[in-house]
Structures are given as structure tokens and as C-alpha cells.
Amino acid sequence: MFDGSGQTRPAYDEYCRWFDEQPGEWMRRKAREADDTFRRTGITFNVYGENEAEERLIPFDMVPRIITAAEWRKLSRGIEQRVRALNSFLYDLYHRQEIVRAGRLPERLLQTNDAWLANMVGFTPPGGIYTHIVGIDLVRTGPDEFFVLEDNARTPSGVSYMLENRETMMGMFPDLFSRVGVESVSNYPRRLARSLAACVPPAFAGGKPTVAVLTPGIYNSAYFEHAFLADQMGAELVEGSDLRVVEGRVQMRTTRGYKPIDVLYRRVDDEFLDPLTFNPDSMLGVPGIMDVYRAGGITIANAPGTGVADDKAIYSFMPEIVEFYTGEKPLLPNVQTWRCADHDSLAYVLDNLAELVVKEVHGSGGYGMLIGPTSSKREIAAFRDKLKAKPENYIAQPTLALSTCPIYTRAGLAPRHVDLRPFVLVSPEGIDITPGGLTRVALKKGSLVVNSSQGGGTKDTWVLKD
């Protein structure tokens, strides 16, 4: 909100004027009101492996994270370039693998990657789209310095929090939105429905496409989001038990019998999608869906096998991937990354563990990582042993000087580290980037971990109108 000299940054000018006009007790009451709203709405997430709370309230901070229109234009160009490259990369991986033939990507990254699916080789998804919904995690280190922290090309989550954060803010501070011109995010479900409907399979018979959201069920950590998006899109929310293959189509049970589905927005991992193809013990998927998919009877969003693009070892090659498929230098750089599978990189990481962030190649949610500067000597020693045992499972990055945004505390405003996950929709009609996204915030003082499962929260993200 403020620069090094204490001056208000241009993005926050009007917000600061508004904030200074508000009585402290009124703002404290509003903070409590926000918590009550989230509790009443049931905006929760699950934490796996913890006994004390199966379900938790998502922490919300009512001070918005604000981005200027000019900054957003710059970010959008970089995000679009990266998403185009990701889609081209996935097509290539499952066809001629030109990037491997050219020596720009080691073949071992595919051979040892569980997310790479042999079943997808030679098959082109409807419309040539692999990544229908993408979340690109960004961090900021300076006024004009944004870096991509990771790519979420499999099943990015969090968009329901983006929408509920905005609705909560507009309900609590309607006068603020009349003073500050903010780009809308509320039409995301409509845009998502339109984007998915544009990806119909060859078997589509015409008329209005039938879109459904496949959820693992109520015990999944993101079930709130699955139900929320289905409701907002006007789509059916289905579980594997609601579906079966009938006459070469995946069909859902209705009060009038079975009805074919054209596009399935699946929130079930590849492994559980089809027990006849993947995990035979899965009760979450649909037996035979992969055969229907390959025969052109259904579109699955995102396509099976896209998880290979989420891999943190693949991430370290993204600058080369962007350049290979677009012919351009990346507009949004990667964070410097050491691949621990490389002997020299491993030696450097082991010598500097106390200063680095080390992540599992297949990890997510902030689990299985080491943040050197905030770890004890015992934790570092234990992680050193894991690293030596399986170096190919890890990458390391420097501890970035992440930008901070203010949060509202009882003592007033206080700085906390943030990241940003913009959401991108891809269809044969083009790439659609919602102006804003999910800002995740490390609510613990000094913490760099923003994941809700690790004590982080969320805040509304404003992109200012020109």
C-alpha cells in the first residue's frame, strides 16, 4: 500500500482516503461481520491428516489487494503467452515430442513422471484443448517484478473464494465500490459455462450442450467449490455413482432416465477417473469413460494427463518451453530453480539448505517442503537426509523478498506476504483471463506460506478500471 518513503502507492490512493475516514470501531465490527458471513455461507476447506478439525473456516481479510489497469495488462500478456505454451507443450508431449527430440527437455522427466499418461498418446482432445481451466501462481518482488511460482494445469482450485470474497466485500462496503472503479469478477461462472460449452465433443448432437461437474463427494477438501460452481453455472453436480456408459456415451441419472453429458468438468484426479483404465479400486470415477473420451463421445476438462505440466521439475524448464513453442522470450520469468537431480545443483542446495526453499517435485498445498530460513537445525538435518536419498524428487529455489499487502488486525493495518492466482479459461474461441484472481495471504507474521492448509487466508483482488 505504501512505498519505501511512506507515500501511498497510486493503486491505493482512493482506498486509503476512504479507509482514513472510517471509525475504528466500525471497521472492527465489519471484520467480525465478514467472519460471520463466511461461517453462515459455509465457506470451508478440509485439512487432511489432522484430527482436531476435519473442516475449517477459510480465513478472510477485508483489506483488498489492488492492482492498476496498466499492471494487469502487463500481467495478462505474460499469462496468455504462458498458457498458450502450456497447451502446445501438452499436445507435443502426447504426439511427436519435438521438444525432447530437439534436446530441450530430458526424456527422463516423462519416463519417471506418474502424471504422464500413455493412454493419451496420439489422441487429440476436442478442439485441441488440454488445459480448459488454468491457475498461474504469481509472486511480486518489486514495483515491476512479477514471477511465476507454479503452474496449476490439472484442477486449479480457489475460484469460489475469489467470487465469495468479492460478494462479501460488496455487501459490506457498497459505498467503497461506488468510489473506486473495480473490474468485475462476478460473471466468471457464466464465462466458465460458455467456455466449456464451446469445447463440445464430435458426438455432440446440437442444441444446448449438457455440462456437468464431477466431484469426489462431500469429504473432498474442495467440495464447497464444486457445488458452488455447478450451482452458479446452472450445471449438474454429479458423482461417479450418478454416471454410467450407455450406448457409447457417458450419461447421468435423472428423474426421466439417463441423459448424455457433452462436457464433464471433472474435479477427480486422473488415477480415480476410470477404474477400467487406472486404479481398479476407484469408486469415484466412471468405468469406461476413457474409451468414450477417445471415441469422441465426451469432453473431459481438464484433459487427463495435464498434470505433467504441474510437475515442479517441468516448471524449471518453462522458460525453454515458452520460447520453444512461441518463439518469444517469456514475458513472466520463472523463479530461479535448482534441479536436485543434477549433481552440481544438488551439491549447491545441500551446502545452502538454511537459505533456500526446497519443494517436492509432485508436492502441492504447501506440504512436504522446507523453508530454510524459518526451519530449525534438526528440521534441516532431517530434510538433508531425504534430499540425499531421493534427490530427483526435489527442486530448490531462493527465498524471495515477497511483496506484502496490509491485513486488518485489532491493532490496525499490518503487512503480510501474499501471492496471486489468476484464473484462465481456454477454449477454441480463445483465452479468457478474469481480471483479478485469488490473493492468498500468509496471516502469520513473517510467514511465507500462504496455503490455507498451512495457516494462510484469502483477500479480495481488485483490478482498477482505466
Image: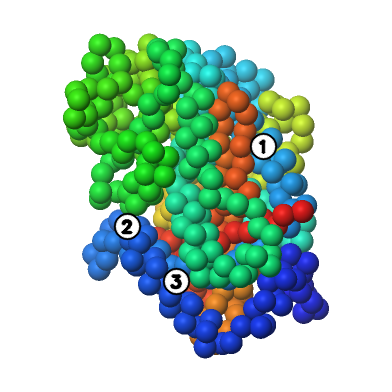
Q: Which residue is mark 3?
A: 34
- N-terminal label among 1 and 2: 2
Q: Nearer the viewer, residue 298 or 255?
A: 255
Instruction: Tell me if residue 267 comes above or below residue 247 in the rendering.
Output: below
Q: What is the secondary structure assignment of the residue under circle 1?
A: helix
Q: Quadrant of residue 46?
A: bottom left
Work out how far the residue at label 1 is from the one at label 3, CA to CA, in angstroms: 34 Å
Q: What is the secondary structure assignment of the residue under circle 2?
A: strand
Residue type (three-letter) at the residue carrying disc 1: Glu
- N-terminal label among 3 and 2: 3
Q: What is the secondary structure assignment of the residue under circle 3?
A: helix
Residue type (three-letter) at the residue carrying disc 2: Asn
Label pair 1/3, CB-CB below 8 angstroms: no
Q: Residue 143 at x, y = what percent?
A: 77, 61
Q: Is residue 35 left or right of residue 410?
A: left
Q: Image point 72% across, 27% down: which residue?
A: 326
Is residue 317 shown to the viewer in this render? Answer: no
Q: Image point 74% across, 46% down: which residue?
A: 73
Q: Which residue is mark 2?
A: 46
Work out how far the residue at label 1 is from the one at label 2, CA to CA, in angstroms: 32 Å
Is residue 134 shown to the viewer in this render? Answer: yes
Residue type (three-letter) at the residue carrying disc 3: Ala
Q: Nearer the viewer, residue 368 or 117?
A: 117
**Which numbered marker is on residue 71?**
none
Q: Which residue is mark 1?
A: 80
Q: Image point 59% across, 79% down: which residue?
A: 414
Structural crowding at the residue carrying mark 1, measured as other residues with C-alpha within 10 Å and reported as few (<14), some (14–19) or many (≥20)? some
